[in-house]
Each structure stands twice: as structure tokens, then as C-alpha cells.
Amino acid sequence: MLAPAFPVADTWRDLRDARVEDCADAGLINHTWLIGSPTRFVLQRVNTLFRPSVHDDIEAVTAHIAAAGLLTPRLVRTDEGALCAIAEDGAAWRLQTFVPGLTVHKMDSVARARAAGALVGRFHQAVDSLEWEYRHVRPGAHDTALHMQRLEAAVRGGPALPVAEGILDGWRAWPGRLDLPMRHTHGDLKLSNLRFDALGNGLCLLDLDTLSRLSLDVELGDAWRSWCNPVGEDGTDTRLDVDLLAGAIAGYRAVRGVTVEEAEGLLYAVERISLELAARFCRDVVEDAYFGWNADRFPDRPAHNLHRALGQLNLARSARAQRSQVAALLHA
């Protein structure tokens, strides 16, 4: 049910007398409702982590890729012409067009991985020609070295935490590079942020609050970490499935090539991002302040984040053990 404190029907004429229902398949950050029967729009109360300027970025990128022929959700301006509306509590409310299709939370086939890779490749190819300086910037979001420094500071002087030592040892031995070129990216390519049709083809990317410039190894490393771990985010016996990775790489490269230096960086990409996320989880084991946790499975937040940190560390170790197979895929 819509929060009555915000007069959405007075802000967008298209919402007057429209059916409104909670979105059962929404993410954890923004509160989401579906509008219309059949659904025509998506209404969101945007988490205050994102400043209203994020909508300037979304509008610039989606207008550009739509002009290139890609399907994408588009912001619906308010009756006064704004990209979003600001409530009294400072939160932004936005309306977007709805793209029918399927949301998938776990990679179910090599064919799906190939379709996911091709979809992201089409997006990257379209934004390669975009000229835009992002208004909403999250400094340090993927500064892996900084995350390691923060973890080291958090555990210094405390009780022994073997998973922290494993993460830090893995980072010290990581042989990749941190100076790859910055490109326009989605910024959060977990599988549930990709939309598919009933035949398994990729339709569009969703949840565009993280649009930014990142290096390709960060962008695809995070994608492959999500797509190619068949155990899922909340297991500890995690591993990199090279068959799924092969599909993802083949789908991407069928649409958009990578440079020699990007291929070099992608060899270590899953390892890097898995270690980075492990460090963030492990730091919250000590600080007990950031990530949400499942009270049905764990006694407290530190216990859940210790479990998550171990899962990501094991995924990084699996990627490291399979570097030669990954190299063969990247240089095929």
C-alpha cells in the first residue's frame, strides 16, 4: 500500500485512479510498487543513499542507449517536468516505465550466461560513445586497496580472525593491476539486475542508480562473481563455474571486443571483486554496522557477515585455482 504521506497521484497524472501494488520481486534498497493492470509503470521511493542528482545520470544514459535502439526503462517526468519528486523527508520518488519480462536470481544454464554476457556487451557498446560527466559519484566504491586497508585497521589489535588473514593474504598475493582505463558502466550487474524474455534472451538492464565510470575488470568481475557461482551468495562452499564463465565471456565477446590490457585485467577480475566483497563483509563482522542480516538463519549480524566473508573468500580462491582455464577462455 502506498505511503499516504506523499501525494503521488498529484505528482504524476498517469497515476490517478491506477491500480497500485507492492512489487514482490523488488530489491532491498528502494521501496518499489507496480502501477496499472497490466503493469505500465514502476514507482519507487529512492533510498536516501542516492542523491536526487542520480536521476540526471539515469536520464542521460537511458536517453543515449534508447537512441541507439536498446530497450530500457525510462524516467517519467512529473507533471511539472522534473525527473523525480522530493518528499518532505528528503527522499526522492520516481516513476519509470515498466519492461515486461523475467527476473532471475540464480544462473540456470550456460545459454543464460551467454545471453547475459551479450546483453551487457550491447549496453557497453552503446555507452562507449556517450559523453557525460556523472553528477552522482560514489568515491571509493570499488577502491579495493582502500577496502583492504580498512579491514586491516578494523581487525588490528583485536582477537584473531582467520578469515580476515585469509582475505588479506589473498590480496597481498593478487597479481593484477589497478590502472585499467575507466569506462561507462552499469556498476551493479548482479543477475537480478538483468531482464530476460520467456525464451531466455536478454532484454535490458535494471536498477540504474549505480551508473558510473569503472574499469572493465571491476564491472565484469562483479557480474561474473554473481553469475558464475552456482552455490549463490549465501553459501560457503562457493566456486567459480568455468562453464558458466565460458558462456558469459562468449556472449560478451560476440558483441563487443576487449583490449589486450582489459583481457589481462579480466583474468584476475573475479578474484579481485570477491576479495573486495569479502573484506567488506569481514570488516562488518568487527564493526557490526552496515549490512543487513537474516535473523531466521543467524543469531546476529556478525555471524551472518562472517559466513558471507568466508563464502566470498572461497570464491576468490576457486578463481585463483582456475586462472589457467580463465586465461584460455579470454584468449580463445
Image (cartoon, rainbow, N blue to C red):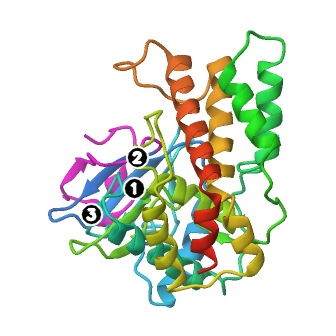
Which quadrant: the C terminus? bottom right
Which residue is the site of mark 3? Answer: 102
Q: Residues within 10 Å of mark 3 (few under 14, many from 20)?
A: some
Q: Residues within 10 Å of mark 2 (few under 14, many from 20)?
A: few
Q: Amino acid at mark 3?
A: Leu
**10 magenta-colored:** yes
Which quadrant: the N terminus? top left
Which residue is the site of mark 1? Answer: 192
Mark 1 and mark 2 in contact? Answer it, CB < 8 Å.
Answer: yes
Q: Amino acid at mark 2?
A: Gly
Q: Is residue 32 at all visible to an observer of this figure?
A: yes
Badge 3 marks a residue whose secondary structure is: strand
**Residue at screen point 20% across, 61% down:** 36
Give the image quarter of residue 146: top right
How far apart, in angstroms, are the residues tagged by discs 3 and 2?
A: 14 Å
Which residue is the site of mark 2? Answer: 27
**Residue at screen point 80% across, 44% down:** 173
Q: Amino acid at mark 1?
A: Ser
Badge 2 marks a residue whose secondary structure is: loop
Mark 3 or 2, nearer chain start: 2
Q: Which residues are magenta?
A: 1-29
> Which residue is nearer to you in this view: 192 or 25?
192
> Which residue is nearer to you in this view: 155 or 294?
155
